[in-house]
Amino acid sequence: MTTNPPPAPRLNLLHAIQALLALLFVSAVFALWIGDPGEPGRALATLLASELAFAVAALLVLTGAGAVGELPLSLPTLRQGAGAILLGLGALLFSAAGPARLYRWVDSQEYTEMLVRLFAELDAQIGTPGILALTVILVPLCEELLFRGVIQRAFLARLKPGTAIVVSALLFGIVHGHPVHGLIAFILGLAAGYALLATGTLWAAILVHAANNAAAILPSLGDAALDENTASVLPWWILLPALGVLGLGGWLVGSQRPPVGSAGPENGQSMGESE
């Protein structure tokens, strides 16, 4: 099944490469500015810098291509928004029942302890409201702007829609560094990429990401402090309902025709049609 690629006339494969190089450059500059992220009090600065690097890299490429005004930012319908939220929740359930189990074999203890220290320090600096603002608002906005708003749309100039979604999601996973965390991010990237393609608006991808992060963070924030069970897993049987949630979310976001001039299917074609 194929679909028309989103119109991104000023973005091409070169811009996807430029976006990744810009991310590396901006991240390096911010890293030099911050210094040692392990020092006390540096957690917030490190997180802010890492996320702003995504946004700055995206804006640099979009500005250079003269494509800032071409960002697909029309508001999704309520049905599409609900579907995007379900896609985010379904991706999290699937990851927690499947890939998250790999944390036990892939450097689990060291990575989990790092997460514990990070969130403990963030909690001391900005509290629960601040953590939620960062992970549910800032992180989805900045990361989706680069990976779906620029990179995925740029790949669509040369690749089939499904391939563009997979490649951008793969790069999204690699950027997260840790192999298991990267695999989980890859699954999230697939859901967010499909939401953008199906609805024609970047806000749908942001909603997917925000719902995923909120559902992952809120249970941990209910405790007095995060502990080594942060990377807990769900039973295997959750995989089946997770697929159901993903399927329902995908149907909802893809069941309405995107607005004219959006980043989704055009000319009245459905997701299963092509020229």
Image (spheres, helix red, strand yellow):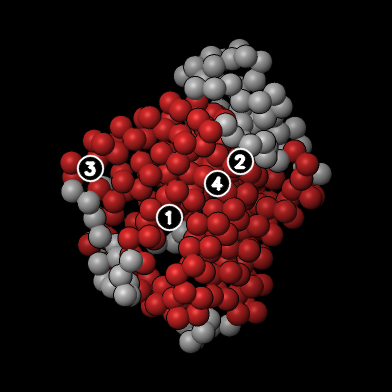
In this view, the residue in front, 123 or 200, is: 123
Kind of residue at disc 4? Ile
Q: Secondary structure at mark 4?
A: helix
Q: Secondary structure at mark 1?
A: helix
Instruction: State which quadrant residue 77 falls in.
Output: top right
Of labels 2 and 3, earlier in sequence is 2
- Residue 206 is labelled as 4
In this view, the residue in front, 206 or 95, is: 206
User: Measuring 50% from the left and 80% from the top, which residue is drawn there?
Assistant: 125
User: Measuring 28% from the left and 73% from the top, which residue is drawn there?
Assistant: 227
Q: Is residue 228 visible?
A: yes
Give residue 267's position: percent from left, percent from top.
66, 15
In this view, the residue in front, 139 or 110, is: 139
- Residue 202 is labelled as 2
Q: Which residue is labeled 3 in the image?
A: 238
Kind of residue at disc 1? Ala
Of labels 2 and 1, earlier in sequence is 2
**C-alpha separation, residue under disc 1 versus residue under disc 3:** 19 Å
**C-alpha separation, residue under disc 4 versus residue under disc 3:** 24 Å
**C-alpha separation, residue under disc 2 versus residue under disc 4:** 6 Å
Callout 3 environment at 10 Å: few (<14), some (14 to 19), or many (20+)?
some
180 in relation to 5, above or below: below
Q: Which residue is labeled 1 in the image?
A: 214
In this view, the residue in front, 205 or 98, is: 205
Instruction: State which quadrant residue 242 falls in.
Output: top left
**C-alpha separation, residue under disc 4 versus residue under disc 1:** 12 Å
Q: Quadrant of the C terminus?
A: top right
